[in-house]
Structures are given as structure tokens and as C-alpha cells.
């Protein structure tokens, strides 16, 4: 198989699903992970197959090492190669002040958003780095504009986890730049996706859209197009970059 293979974590909905479809249109075979909604993941797979592409949905919890290892083993068994990774899987929680946050909430936030990104990147580097016999590749981490805004009174823990993702992006990019791997991040702003409902505010994107300089929320596809650009050859001299996709916010 000559087409490149991309793994998109959290690929069953929102930005992940949009990225899976955009990557398929760009010629990638797509592996996408999901944690609970297998039906949504299979819908994305079918949509890619309708486009004439190849796709595989894998149930995985990126916060669990054994689950991550099994996910990468499934990709190895199916395609025998990996060319790109999109660290998109992430969680948010209901709005809260820091003085009301539980340890359980904090562990869930950092285990998924930070540890999960590290584990998946580790396995991707082991497969893509020329140091390990790979052909090179590209990693895109999905961060958030919250990493520079702080999200006071709402999601300081989420913002802090994405701040860690930003630092991770810069550090890893320098670590593997001479090994054929580029590492970048996108930082979406107010995007109209289902993640707001999981934080208890399903109308958040619509309500906050007027505060954005462009006067509207963004779409998942607008973020996906930036991600696919960073994955592909048109961004061949771009690494260690934090690309804001936030309507000027």
C-alpha cells in the first residue's frame, strides 16, 4: 500500500471526525480511535469508504498505556506503517473554580489530555523516526486557545493541560527534527462541536461567537483543514509551530 497512514485519536466526532474525512480526501488511510461511541466511529469509517478511502476504527483509552499499545498494534497489523499522528483525544469538564476541583477531575483531565498525548507520540516516534528505522512523518497536537487565555472561572485545569501540550509540542519538535519528524500544534478557539455539551454548555459556541473578532464560532472543518495542512508536504519546513485557528481571539 502506497498511501500514507494517519492515526487520529478521538476521531469519532467533532474536530477528530472532520479531520478524518479531510485526511481521507487528501489521500491518507485513516485509523481513528474512539472511547465509547462505536456507532459514531463506524459512521466516520463508512463515510471515508464512500469516498473510496480506507479506514479503521479502534476502541482505545489514550490515558491507559495497555490500550494505547493495543491500538498501535492494530495499525501495525492492518497497514504495517504509520506516517502521521493527530493527538486529538481530549476531555473537558463542567465550569468550575480551581478551589472546587476534585483530584479525580484533575487526574482525568491531565491523564487524557497530557499523558495520552505523550503515550501516543512515543509510539508514533518509535515507528516514524529514522533513528528507529522509520521513514519520517508528522505529528499534530490539538491544543486550545485556552492555553494562552487561562479560562478563569471555567476550565483552568483544561487550559493548563493544553499549556502542557504546547510545551510538549515545542520540545518534541526539537528532539526529533533531525529524525524526519515534524511536530506542530493547532490551537482552536470557539469551535461549534459537541465538546461543549460534555462540559454542560451545549450553546457555548453560539453564545460566545459574538465575542470573537470574526463575530462567529469556527467549524470543525476549518480546524481540520489546518491540521491536514500541517500533516502534509505543503508545510514541509514547519515544525514547532503553534497555529491559532481562533478567528482572531
Image (cartoon, helix red, strand yellow):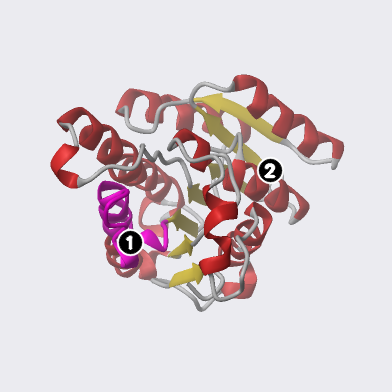
> Tag 2, which secondary structure?
strand
Q: Principal SS element in the magenta part?
A: helix
- Residue 29's disc is 2
Q: Is residue 3 visible?
A: no
Determine the residue positioned at 57% across, 23% down.
37
Determine the residue positioned at 58% across, 38% down.
11
**Which residues fall within the magenta stretch?**
143-165
Task: For marks 2 and 1, give the CA distance.
Answer: 31 Å
- Residue 147's disc is 1
Q: Is residue 56 above or below residue 52?
A: above
Q: Residues within 10 Å of mark 2 (few under 14, many from 20)?
A: many
Q: Is residue 23 visible?
A: yes
Report whether 57 appears left or right of 161: right
> Could you tell me residue 165's position as x and y percent?
32, 56
Determine the residue positioned at 49% across, 62% down.
189
- Residue 196's disc is none
> Of residues 203 and 10, which is closer to you in this image?
203
Q: How many marks?
A: 2
> Of residues 163 and 97, which is closer to you in this image?
97
Determine if the magenta segment contains residue 131: no
> Of residues 130 and 243, which is closer to you in this image?
243
> Could you tell me residue 49's position as x and y percent?
81, 35
Q: Is residue 53 above or below residue 191?
A: above
Q: Are marks 2 and 1 in contact (CB under 8 Å)?
A: no
Which quarter of the rendered picture does the N terminus lie within?
top right
Amino acid at each position: 500500500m502506497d498511501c500514507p497512514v494517519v492515526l487520529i485519536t478521538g476521531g469519532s466526532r467533532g474536530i477528530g471526525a472532520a479531520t478524518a474525512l479531510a485526511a481521507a480526501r487528501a489521500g491518507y488511510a485513516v485509523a481513528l480511535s474512539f472511547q465509547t461511541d462505536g456507532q459514531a466511529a463506524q459512521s466516520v469509517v463508512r463515510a471515508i469508504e464512500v469516498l473510496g478511502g480506507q479506514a479503521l476504527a479502534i476502541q482505545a483509552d489514550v490515558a491507559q498505556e495497555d490500550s494505547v499499545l493495543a491500538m498501535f498494534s492494530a495499525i501495525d497489523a492492518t497497514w504495517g506503517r504509520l506516517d502521521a499522528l493527530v493527538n486529538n483525544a481530549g476531555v473537558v469538564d463542567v465550569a468550575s473554580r480551581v478551589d472546587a476541583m476534585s483530584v479525580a477531575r484533575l487526574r482525568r483531565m491531565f491523564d487524557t489530555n497530557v499523558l495520552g498525548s505523550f503515550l501516543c507520540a512515543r509510539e508514533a516516534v518509535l515507528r516514524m523516526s529514522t533513528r528507529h528505522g522509520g521513514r519520517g512523518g508528522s505529528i499534530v497536537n490539538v491544543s486550545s486557545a485556552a492555553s494562552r487565555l487561562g479560562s478563569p472561572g471555567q476550565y483552568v485545569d483544561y487550559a493548563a493541560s493544553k499549556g502542557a501540550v504546547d510545551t510538549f509540542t515545542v520540545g518534541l519538535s526539537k528532539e526529533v527534527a533531525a529524525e524526519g519528524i515534524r511536530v506542530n500544534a493547532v490551537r482552536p478557539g470557539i469551535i461549534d462541536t459537541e465538546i461543549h455539551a460534555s462540559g454542560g454548555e451545549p450553546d457555548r459556541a453560539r453564545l460566545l461567537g459574538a465575542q470573537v473578532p470574526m463575530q462567529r464560532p469556527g467549524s470543525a472543518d476549518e480546524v481540520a483543514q489546518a491540521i491536514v495542512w500541517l500533516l502534509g508536504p505543503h508545510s514541509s519546513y514547519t515544525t514547532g509551530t503553534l497555529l491559532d485557528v481562533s478567528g482572531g481571539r
